[in-house]
Each structure stands twice: as structure tokens, then as C-alpha cells.
Amino acid sequence: MSVPPRITAPAGAASPRDLLAAQERRRLAREALPRIRASATGWRNAIGVLMAGLVGFGLVKGRTDVGQLEQTWAAVVGGLLLAGLVSGAWGAYLLNRAAHGPLASVPAGSHATRSAIEHRETVEALSAMRRGIVLSLGCAILLVLAVGATWYGPAAKEPALELTSPGTGSVCGAVTRVARGTIWLTSGDTTVEIPLADVTRLRTVEACP
């Protein structure tokens, strides 16, 4: 047995306060998308300046060649740089998507109202902006970590020392010991003992000739 629909008394007339509240909600909904677009543009420009400062102006620098790092650390630096590149590219796309809209048009047969389309785009733009900010800042963090690894990572080869003294001439090798005013340099299977008082020239080199 079906239940007949109930007919209730009509609601009372809207008060001026209700009308003002409805107008305010309509205004906020109409202005939400332009505000998000402007905010996304500001974030995109700010992060662009940050990345330009990190990369273009050399605010952070490490070794110029990751081949100077120990093999495992070189692989870690390469992974961080690759992750930073992917994160930065995807973050830049999302920020541009939030600032300018999707790379797609509304289907011609869509029956959605203008307000419904703008509301959906507002929600999607806000989500894209938030994710774009996180990914772009993550790119900056990954870049700093990669540069830090090139600073503090172990070298593939220990730096060598080149000494010149009257008794030995020019000698190059890795320092194996320093004690009682004497330094021991090892090159291959040969170890040379040199008094520091006799050293007339001393410099560090990446590798012995």
C-alpha cells in the first residue's frame, strides 16, 4: 500500500537577513575560482623565483662532477636529481593547471549549468594548487639534499698531496701517517718518509700525475 505524499504548509517569506546571506554565498561562489587562479599564479611565480635562485644564481653548489663521488653516493645523488626533476615538472604543471585551467574543453553536449561547472573547476583547481605547491617545494628540498650529498659524500679517490723537498724532489701520494714532524706519502706500493722541516712546496691535487 503506497503512502500518499504529505502536503506541508509553505515556508514563510525570506527575511532581509536570509536574502543578504544568499547574496553573500552567491558572491563568494562567483569569486572563488578567480581567487584560486590568482593564488596559484602567485605561488607559481614565487616558487619559480626560488628555483631560479637555487639553480641559476648558484646559491647552493657542490662538486661539479658526481663522478668524483664514491659510486654508491653518486647513484644516490643521481636518484635525488631525477626525483627532483620529476617532482618539479609535475608540480609546475599542476600550478599552471590551477592558474589557467585544464587542457581540455567542456563537451558541447554537456547539460551542466555554468555554476555547476565553475564549482567543479574551483574544487579541482584548489586540489591542483595544493598538490603543485607540495611537489614544487619537494623539488627544492630534493635539490638541496642532492647538493648536500655532493658536499659531504665520500670521494671516489682520496685527495693526494704533492710535496717538494731537497732530499726527495717532487713526491706525490696519499698521506698515510703524520708523526713527530714527519709525513709518510704512499703512491702505489711505495711509501716515502719526508721531514716536514725540509718541505719547500706543498699542495693538494685531485690525483697524482
Image (tube, grey):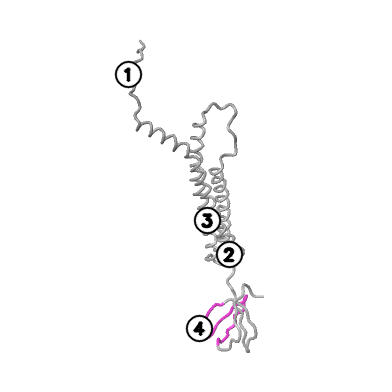
Q: What residue would you read off at disc 2? A: 69
Q: Nearer the viewer, mark 1 or mark 3?
A: 1
Measure the C-alpha gap from mark 3 to mark 2.
Answer: 22 Å
Instruction: Please tell me whether mark 4 sits on a helix, a strand or a loop.
Output: strand
Question: Which amino acid, mark 1?
Answer: Ala
> Residue 140 placed where, x, y %?
52, 56
Question: Which amino acid, mark 4?
Answer: Ala
Magenta span: 175-196
Identify the mark nearer the N-term, 3 or 4: 3
Which residue does the image show at 51% across and 35% down from the upper left? Answer: 118
> Residue 145 placed where, x, y %?
52, 59
- Mark 3 Cα shell of 10 Å, populated few (<14), some (14-19), many (≥20): many
Q: What residue would you read off at disc 1? A: 9
Instruction: Please tell me whether mark 3 sits on a helix, a strand or a loop.
Output: helix
Mark 3 and mark 1 in contact (Cβ < 8 Å)? no
Q: What residue would you read off at disc 4? A: 179
Identify the mark nearer the N-term, 4 or 1: 1
